[in-house]
Amino acid sequence: MSKTYSISELASEFDVTTRSIRFYEDQVLLHPARRGQTRIYSSKDRVRLKLTLRGKRLGFSLAEIRELFELWDETRSGSEKQLHLMLSKISERKAALEQQMKDITMVQLELESAEIRCRQALEELNEKHPATAK
Amino acid sequence: MSKTYSISELASEFDVTTRSIRFYEDQVLLHPARRGQTRIYSSKDRVRLKLTLRGKRLGFSLAEIRELFELWDETRSGSEKQLHLMLSKISERKAALEQQMKDITMVQLELESAEIRCRQALEELNEKHPATAK
DNA sequence: TCTCAGCTTTACGTTAACGTAAACTTGTTT
DNA sequence: AAACAAGTTTACGTTAACGTAAAGCTGAGA
């Protein structure tokens, strides 16, 4: 038997509320088993939650994440058409991620130059008031 | 005199609605001049809009973007305290961006393996039905 | 037995980021 | 003059992603 998790274990591990986790289930991102009425999460559920949160950090909507999960599941038994659809979705995502990489690089450059500007301004202040606290 | 833009010029250039552009002004991200009651955007406004949209693509909220703009403006006439605040905000952002880079790399790897899996499934289909349309 | 922590469902509330519609002004073309 | 395009303000509507009660079940311990 592989490991299972309670809702609060996952909540504290990933620092989200139990409300969010249940909400993700409503949105068909997770399918925990039940013991009585209590939810039991498998390690597969755990992975799905991790992927969900990662997707969110990248600005994916829950609906988009769900779409990817479903496409992925259908891939196993996919028809040729399904597979080509999946491939096109994948390349859509890849393109979006590349754009994001570029965006990040640009913003990083801007932050770098902002930092330099700040440090220079600090130096100038220190020349005028050398006695100021560090 | 440097170049100016109408609201709809900017809207079509960046593929956003005029509604959004006016909304960004409400949120103090843009400060266009006026001729009569008509908004006139400078190239500085244009840059701000570009930065705003880039920030959005990275998942920044409009409030966060505004905060960065304001901190940046205050940097010019910043006190030592302001400058240190700015520096800490900058390093916050840098850390967040690095996390995002990691996330993107992970997702890219997952997409790669998904793509490979799809292509293999397609090959298997073609072995079974070599006569199927390409 | 009682209580208490941890889980559950149900359901209304909230915030961000706009969409959408109505009604108006202003400059330009027919 | 009339109509049109492009702009404006005002204001209510909408969606996503939860927050926040309220009220009830359930097994382990005092």
Image: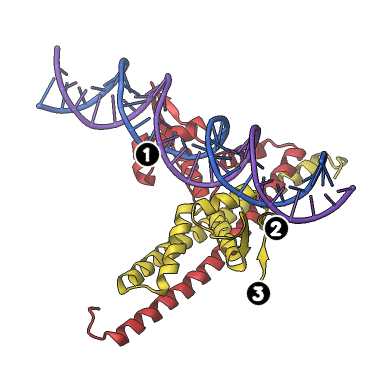
Chain colours: A red, B yellow, C purple, D blue
Residue at image coords 57%, 55%: B57
Residue at image coords 53%, 48%: A55
Q: Kindly identify the amino acid type of the residue bearing the numbered disc 2.
A: Glu
For mark 3, what is the residue? B1
Q: Is residue A29 visible?
A: yes
Dividing the picture into quarters, in which one does residue B130 lie? Answer: top right
Mark 2 or mark 3, which is nearer to you?
Answer: 3
For mark 1, what is the residue? A17
Q: Please give the label number shown on residue B9.
A: 2
Residue B26 lies, with reference to residue A30, above or below; the image says below
**Mark 3 falls on what kind of element?**
loop
Mark 1 or mark 2, which is nearer to you?
Answer: 2
Residue A57, percent from left and from top:
49, 51
Q: Kindly identify the amino acid type of the residue bearing the numbered disc 1.
A: Thr
Q: On what subunit does the disc labeled 3 rest?
A: B
Q: CA distance from mark 1 to mark 3?
A: 54 Å
Residue C2, percent from left and from top:
14, 17
Q: CA distance from mark 1 to mark 2?
A: 44 Å
**Mark 1 falls on what kind of element?**
loop
> Foreground: B41 or A98?
B41
**Label 1 environment density (alpha carbons within 10 Å; few <14, some 14–19, many ≥20):** some
Residue at image coords 27%, 84%: A129
Q: CA distance from mark 2 to mark 3?
A: 18 Å
> Foreground: A42 or A11?
A11
Residue at image coords 40%, 67%: B91
